[in-house]
Amino acid sequence: MSWILASASPRRRQLLKDLVDDFEVIPATGEERVDTTLSPAEQCKALAVKKAREIASKNAGKYVLGADTVVAVEDTVLGKPKDEEDAKRMLRLLSGRTHDVFTGVCIVTPDGREFSAVDGTQVRFYPLDEAFIEAYVKGGSPMDKAGAYGIQDGGLVEGIDGSYTNVVGLPIELCDRLITKIKESEK
């Protein structure tokens, strides 16, 4: 099986290594526009499908995995911050609260079939003081992450209900189930 990861995320690359022996990375470049009338879970699934389709259309004969992660507080979706002030705003919003993280995954097979699903995890944040937020943002970690944080960074997350790897950006358990489903369909 020849695989492509349609993402530039180093975290997704590392996680996919646990499931797929060999793959190449070809990030999707299309605009990440989505129908905002969809639920946060449906939004990230739609973007994952869009990314996988984009790369599959240019790489015949390969399995292509696309993924997208969103952070949602109630029904407000937090994407990647635009700048440092936006990152601080997001962290203040998440401080001391529980929010949802959804990751949509889509695998397009060499024959064009699509297998997609969404995983959700609830994340509880510690209350964050302004000094912590300032220092965290100055360190640069939040700038390329949905919701302006990485679960692997210390001092933010009090606990989770669900998949840890989902919050990192690629729900390994869900991906494994999709791969198994694909293999069974090809027998």
Image (tube, rainbow, N blue to C red):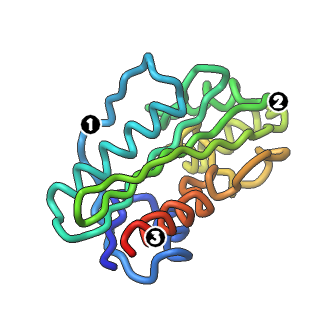
User: In this image, 40 relative to 167: left or right?
Assistant: left
Question: Closest to the observer: 125 or 42?
Answer: 42
Residue at disc 1, secondary structure: loop
Residue 36 in the image: x percent, y percent?
A: 42, 20
- The C terminus appears in which quarter of the rendering? bottom left
From this view, report whether residue 100 is shown above or below residue 117: above
Is 169 displayed left or right of 22 in the figure? right
Q: Which SS class for mark 2? A: loop
Quarter holding residue 23? bottom left
Residue occupying image coordinates x 46% and y 38%: 44
Mark 3: which amino acid?
Glu
Which residue lies under the disc numbered 1?
A: 31
Mark 3–mark 1 CB contact (< 8 Å): no
Q: Are marks 2 and 1 in contact (CB under 8 Å)?
A: no
Query: Disc 3 to disc 1, how far (Cα)?
Result: 33 Å
Query: Do callouts 2 and 3 mark residues in contact (Cβ within 8 Å)?
Result: no
Point out residue 174 in the picture as x, y percentages from the top left corner.
58, 57
Q: Nearer the viewer, mark 2 or mark 3?
A: 3
Nearest to the eye among marks 2 and 1: give it. Answer: 1
Mark 2 highlights which residue? 96
Question: Where does label 3 land, which residue?
Answer: 184
Outermost front residue = 187
Q: CA–CA distance between discs 2 and 3? A: 44 Å
Secondary structure type for disc 3:
helix
* Amino acid residing under circle 1: Glu
- Relative side of 167 to 184, left or right: right
| Residue at x 32%, y 57% (from the top left corner) | 108
